[in-house]
Amino acid sequence: MTSTAGVAPANPHETATKAPRGRKLTGYWLILPGALWLLVFFVIPFYSLLAASLFDPKGSPLTGYDMTWHFGNFVDAFDQYKGQIGRSILYAGIATLTCLVVGYVLAYAIAFKAGRWKNLMLVLVIAPFFTSFLLRTLSWKLILADDGWVVSAAQTLHLTNLLNLIGLTSTDDRLLATPFAVIAGLTYNFLPFMVLPLYASLEKVDIRLIEASGDLYASPIRGFFKVTFPLSLPGVVAGTLLTFIPAAGDYVNAQLLGSPNTRMVGNSIQNLFTSQGDYAAAGALSVILMVIIVAAVMLYVRTAGTEELV
Amino acid sequence: MAELDRRTVLKGVGGAAFVGVSAAALKYGFNTPDQKQNPADRMAKDVSATDKRLVFSNWPEYIDEDDGKYVSTLSQFEKDTGIKVQYTADVNDNNEFFAKVKNQLGSGTSTKRDLFALTDWMAARMIQVGWIQKLDASKVPNLHANIIDSLAKPEWDPKRDYSAPWQSGLTGIAYNKSKAGEIKSFSELISRKDLKGRVSLLTEMRDTMGFMLLIEGADPENFTDAQWQKATDRLAKAKGDGQFRSFTGNDYVQDLASGNVLACEAWSGDIANAGDENLVWIPPEEGIIIWADNMLIPNMATHQDNAEKWINYYYEPEVAAKLANYNSYICPVKGAQEAMEKVNPDNVHNELIFPTEKTLAKTHRFMALDEAQIRTYEKDFSDVTGS
């Protein structure tokens, strides 16, 4: 794309010399509130977390913790919780892919086919946010209850058998307290974060380009993959990031919809902080999760080639 | 060339300074100090007389409520004293609640609560680190006159200077008799195939591990490391086999009532309170775990006097009988059994409220742990339950 929106004027040297001093500072003043916000709510907590991850593991919340550069915490935490880390990435990955497929179809329909229903449909996508995240997840517990009609319907249709076969549920013919319920919960809760960026970039696609692909004898499917999908890539990248990152760290879905055998890394961190009061291990595990996600995101963004997408 | 050099140098110096400042900040900025406090230094000005309020945090389903003509003990207290009680059921788990108030109490600031109820071991821990205010004995005469003998002298507060039991209770098994066959023992609960994936246990380490130790033939009051290891291994194996639906705080009743959970580890009064005929509570064959939840006045509480009035009020036998009649937990007040005649004659011989010597003989407590042991045991336990 060759859009020049947002690109600085061609000769920065000239503007730098000519701009009056007051105006030169305006930029900094505008950054200040955001920078202060980040300092207070990101930089300081981040340092605090980093310090906690290097605490002497012999401390306790009551006797206090000393920072002793105890790098062994990372090895211990990774070693003990690699299962939960792997599970988190797996569950979040499946949920993100499901969101992408479901969300793309929905965003496509809203952007191109909804006509005058467009705004209504967008409001409906956001509508779940009118209720609290926690309440919505708890309601799924009611809907998927063992004695509920959803489970008996799934049993009659042999859906539970199918899910058992691919290992998403246990052999007890139920949905709650299985990996399936956790992944479904993640998918449900993060779907709007996928749909909105997808919609935003599909909405911007120039419909004439798609028509042009038809004029050049591309079948609708070929046209979609050659024109529409590449043009929507910024939305795909933004949507997958907005879904995957919070999903990988989520612990509410695993706690409410899962069982002790489906715990994710967020549950381990929460448990280390509150039940065990082991700040060193909890900090180390949080930092490990952060590093893994940042590395994965950088790799993903580089592969997806976003420099020409934005 | 010279300019480039200067830049490189500046960058180098800047980078080194950044790393240095960061390292210093990490090293000295975030250490957590010892959280011990001296309760005498942490007394807030008592505004009870002018601000007639009391803020009390308790466990769920633990107090009677107004119902038609029935006036609850709380409403009666408000009527008698003119004190407005802000009663919140926000204690679901001792560790969770500890995490909630730890920062305030550890740094000597107010928790905005005047009273909360915690189980013996957590009460002991908080008293030890000086987070709890001493009760003025002259203001709680009923407590010292009426507390039952078995609760009067715990080793962590031998004269009940700091704590007053709200209720005591037993931990056992509850199950849904319309959906699960009879259950007699805790070992059935953790192994029976027909219950697989439909059992919940408690996150209270002393309750759950108490039973696991009893299964191993060990004494929860005095066990060896090897017995502990065996007990946690057995729990881990049952968890790995998918026997458990969840590990819960006081929130287990919903899942039991809705049928998601067929059987669970449960506290004696909750099941009677649930008012569902199909739910039954039984003492397991291995034994019963006994505990008490204690009212404590935290440091910096501003309505001490009101809190003491409250404690004194609940140690009147008639009030205690009314409360126990509602929540079916062991009543800590002498004379309540006689008072129960008037409140509800059916409950005078209710074992859950007034256990006989025979029942009490089957009960076990968990051994007292020091801070380091708490860490080790809680870690072993929550490595199984929490991850």
Image (cartoon, coloured by chain):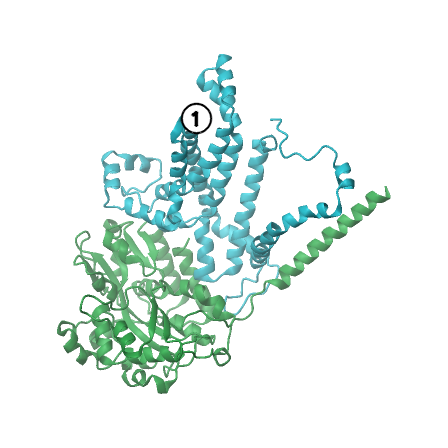
Chain colours: A cyan, B green
Q: Where is residue A88 in the image (x, y as percent from the top left)?
A: 45, 45
How many numbered dots are placed on residues in this image?
1
Residue at point 30%, 65% (across, down): B214
Q: Residue at x 54, y 71 (%)?
A: B34
Q: Nearer the viewer, residue A17 or A261?
A: A17
Check disc 1: other Cα within 10 Å, few if <14, some if 14-19, many if 20+.
Answer: some
The residue indicated by pointer 1 is: A112
Q: Is residue B42 visible?
A: yes
Identify the image quadrant of residue A17: top right
Residue situated furthest left in the rendering: B345
What secondary structure is found at the residue carrying circle 1?
Answer: helix
Residue at the image point whose x is 54% and y is 49% from the top: A288
**Residue lying furthest right:** B2
The answer to whether residue B79 is left or right of residue A278 is left
**B141 shown above or below A212:** below
| Observer-nearest of A192 and B366 | A192
